[in-house]
Image (tube, grey):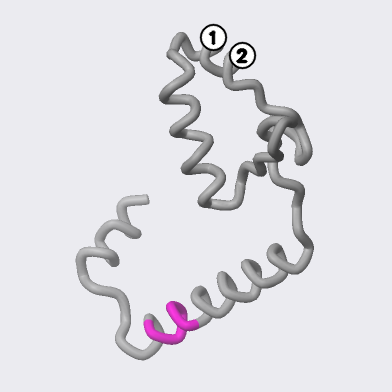
Amino acid sequence: MILPPGCFLSESEIASKFGASRTPVREAFMQLREAGLVTTLPSRGNFVTRLNREKILEARFLREAIEVANVCRLVEVGLPPSSQAALRKT
């Protein structure tokens, strides 16, 4: 949350900040756009994607379902000995 949702992203400023050319920054923006983290508006530029309540709730639901399934599986089969040893060390 260093860059707030809706914040303008300047390729040249980011390239300058990291001492890189604009090409790798442009490629990074493409990957972020594919991940839904950057929005590009024609003739306006790149922006941090605004938060979407429905997507946040869906992600939370999926994460909780995965975590509960993992805990249920661990209860059924137990922890492997290597994991038990690692936990004892901490």
Decide whether residue 71 is among the magenta residues.
Answer: yes
Element type at marker 2?
helix
Q: Is residue 24 left or right of residue 54?
A: left
52 up-or-down from 47: above or below: below
Residue 64 in picture, x, y percent from top left: 59, 74
31 up-or-down from 61: above or below: above
How many numbered discs?
Answer: 2
Q: Return the residue at label 2.
A: 13
Quick one: 37 or 21, which is closer to the camera?
21
Which segment is the magenta one? 69-73
5 up-or-down from 22: above or below: below
For the residue marked with disc 2, what is the amino acid?
Glu
Q: Main secondary structure of the magenta part?
A: helix
Q: Return the residue at label 1.
A: 16
59 up-or-down from 21: above or below: below
Q: Is residue 42 left or right of residue 29?
A: right
For the residue marked with disc 1, what is the amino acid?
Ser
Element type at marker 1?
helix
